[in-house]
Image (cartoon, helix red, strand yellow):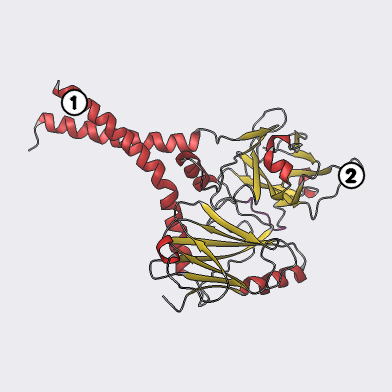
């Protein structure tokens, strides 16, 4: 039978291990990704880089595994609209952006779990290939729940409820943007109408 | 005095556990990805997943605008030759990742225009030996296990999809004869 002192020591070291595990997990998953901001959008310049620190590497592995180095691709992400409110899958948003200085760009919506929203019509993203640019040089489109009235016209269809994250991918960004990613004219995200319940 | 010693040791255990967890997370995730990919590879050493849609739930944040091909290989038994003979007129890239998830090499249609496109992937020790006899670029991997991800830009046009399919089928990840 273990003595009381041994049991107390066992409990102490078990707690230390559990706290070490929990603090690492919370630090990696709850503390926001560091990076450079352009409006509500943030880009981590060490994503995929061999120079990434341990925390960045762990966060990238969980939230954006197999990211490319910044020289090949810049990944801007946001989970907030222009009014600083959290993006919600059950709400409609209008997005407007000036096509960024890159060989190719796309905006994709992801559910809170990091995966695409189910949509039989495969309306997952808008890219430089299929975006229609207005006379003022901006591409405009709706992100809306499939079940909402706006869902018919949406270029990106969401479903369910909960948080949502948008990723703007810039493949082979121009040198100027690589050097100063904060100079990106950030895509505008405005909540449009009411959310479905 | 003894209690203080145990308390300080416990703090040390906490810190070490924290650091080890942060260090291990990307390696464990990559190990899982590479192990699953290895089990599904073809004779050419590649895995060609279906076009990305909402059912793609293996790796977070998949791009629906890209068609992928992957290779997962170990360099313990010798270097691996990667070749891609396909012609694809749109964006494509081949990226190599170490077992800690670092992207240590990337090439694509802009800087790999000459045919045939061949790369020899080896460890630092293997790179010192004369394993390659043909003209090809040699890439030194920072880890024994390597994951290759090829990306091809596609859209809904069936012709584009067919071109991309043909192109990714020409990807090869094969052990060199010298190993």
Q: Within 10 angstroms of label 1, few (less than 14), some, or many (20 or more) residues? A: few
Parent chain of label 1: B
Per the picture, the main secondary structure of the magenta-coloured stretch is: loop
Magenta region includes residue A118: yes
**What residue sits 64% from the left and 45% below the top?**
A75
The quarter of the picture where the N terminus of chain A appears is: top left
| The disc label shown at residue A134, or none | 2
Parent chain of label 2: A
Q: Is residue B22 left or right of residue A9?
A: right
**What residue sits 69% from the left and 37% below the top?**
A180
Q: Residue B32 falls in which quadrant of the image?
A: bottom left
User: Do labels 1 and 2 touch, CB within 8 Å?
Assistant: no
Observer able to see residue A148: no
Q: Secondary structure at mark 2?
A: loop
Q: Secondary structure at mark 1?
A: helix
In three-dimensional space, the C-alpha distance between marks 1 and 2, rounded to whole angstroms, equals: 70 Å
Observer able to see residue B96: yes
Along the line of sight, which residue is nearer the eye, B119 or A45?
B119
Q: Residue B168 falls in which quadrant of the image?
A: bottom right
Q: Is residue B167 above or below residue A80?
A: below
Are callouts 1 and 2 both on one chain? no
Q: Is residue A150 left or right of residue A135?
A: left
How many numbered discs?
2
Q: Which residues are magenta?
A: A116-121
Q: Residue A35 falls in which quadrant of the image?
A: top right
Along the line of sight, which residue is nearer the eye, B7 or B73?
B73
**What residue sits 65% from the left and 52% below the top?**
A72
**What residue sits 58% from the left and 69% below the top?**
B48
Q: Which residue is mark 1?
A: B5
Residue B65: x and y in percent read 69, 57
């Amino acid at each position: 039978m273990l003595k009381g002192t041994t049991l107390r020591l066992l409990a102490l070291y078990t707690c230390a291990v559990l706290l070490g595990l929990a603090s690492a997990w919370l630090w990696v998953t709850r503390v926001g990704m560091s990076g450079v901001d352009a409006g509500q959008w943030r880009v981590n310049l060490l994503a995929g880089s061999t120079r990434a620190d341990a925390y960045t590497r762990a966060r990238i592995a969980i939230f954006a595994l197999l990211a490319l180095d910044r020289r090949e691709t810049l990944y801007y992400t946001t989970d907030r609209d222009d009014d600083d409110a959290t993006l919600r899958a059950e709400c409609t948003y209008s997005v407007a952006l000036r096509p960024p200085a890159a060989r190719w760009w796309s905006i994709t919506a992801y559910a809170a779990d990091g995966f695409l929203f189910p949509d039989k019509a495969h309306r997952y993203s808008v890219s430089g290939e299929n975006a229609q640019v207005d006379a003022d040089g901006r591409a405009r489109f709706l992100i809306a729940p499939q079940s909402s009235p706006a869902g018919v016209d949406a270029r990106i269809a969401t479903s369910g409820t909960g948080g949502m994250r948008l990723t703007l991918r810039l493949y082979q960004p121009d040198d100027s943007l690589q050097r100063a990613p904060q100079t990106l004219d950030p895509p505008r995200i405005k909540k449009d109408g009411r959310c479905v319940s | 005095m003894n209690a203080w010693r145990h308390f300080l040791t416990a703090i040390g255990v906490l810190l070490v556990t924290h650091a080890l967890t942060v260090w291990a997370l990307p390696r464990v995730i990559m190990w899982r990805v590479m192990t699953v990919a290895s089990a599904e590879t073809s004779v050419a050493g590649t895995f060609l997943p279906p076009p990305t849609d909402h059912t793609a739930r293996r790796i977070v944040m998949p791009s629906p605008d890209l068609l992928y091909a992957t290779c997962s290989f170990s360099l313990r038994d010798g270097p691996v030759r990667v070749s891609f003979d396909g012609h694809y007129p749109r964006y494509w890239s081949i990226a190599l990742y170490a077992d800690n998830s670092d992207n240590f090499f990337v090439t694509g249609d802009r800087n790999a225009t000459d045919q045939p496109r061949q790369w020899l992937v080896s460890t630092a020790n293997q790179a010192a030996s004369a394993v390659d006899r043909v003209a090809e670029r040699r890439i030194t991997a920072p880890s024994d296990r390597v994951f290759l991800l090829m990306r091809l830009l596609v859209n809904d046009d069936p012709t584009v999809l067919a071109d991309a399919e043909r192109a990714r089928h020409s990807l090869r990840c094969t052990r060199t004869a010298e190993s």
